[in-house]
Image (spheres, rainbow, N blue to C red):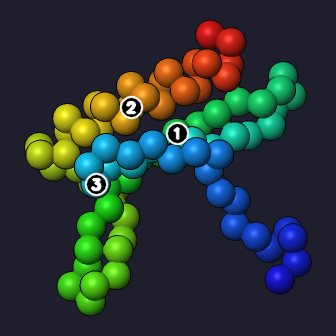
């Protein structure tokens, strides 16, 4: 596989319960910046672990926790 075919990976992933925040570094004209994606991991009936971008009531507290952690992580590296 050629290097340009590699799938980008997040610079870090923060977790709480089955919820994760993946932080992605991008390069812009003014320098690097970060974006965050959130996912809920679950085990599919066939036993594989999959991600969903849908959250239920029981997931929201963990989502708040990783969102706050991601905010602090990005702010520390963005000078804000």
As drawn, 28 above or below 42: above
Q: Is residue 30 left or right of residue 7?
A: right
Tag 3's secondary structure?
loop
Residue 63 screen position, x and y as percent: 29, 38
Residue 69 screen position, x and y as percent: 43, 28
**Residue picked out by circle 1:** 36
Who comes first in sequence, dot 2 or dot 3?
A: 3
Q: Is residue 34 left or right of residue 52?
A: right
Which residue is nearer to you in this view: 43 or 30?
A: 43
Judged by depth in the image, the label closer to the viewer, 3 or 1, is 3
Kindly indicate whether the residue at mark 1 contacts the one at mark 3 (C-beta within 8 angstroms).
no
Kindly indicate whether the residue at mark 1 contacts the one at mark 2 (C-beta within 8 angstroms).
yes
Identity of the residue drawn at 69% across and 67% down: 7
Identity of the residue drawn at 83% across and 83% down: 1
Residue 14 screen position, x and y as percent: 45, 43
Tag 1's secondary structure?
strand
Separation of residues labelled 2 and 3 (CA atoms):
13 Å
**Residue picked out by circle 3:** 18
């Amino acid at each position: 596989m050629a290097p340009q075919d590699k799938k980008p990976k997040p610079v870090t992933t923060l977790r709480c319960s089955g919820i994760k925040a993946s932080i992605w570094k991008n390069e812009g004209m003014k320098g690097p910046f970060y974006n965050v994606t959130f996912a809920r991991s679950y085990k599919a009936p066939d036993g594989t672990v999959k991600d969903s971008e849908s959250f239920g009531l029981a997931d929201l507290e963990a989502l708040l926790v990783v969102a706050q952690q991601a905010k602090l992580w990005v702010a520390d590296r963005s000078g804000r």
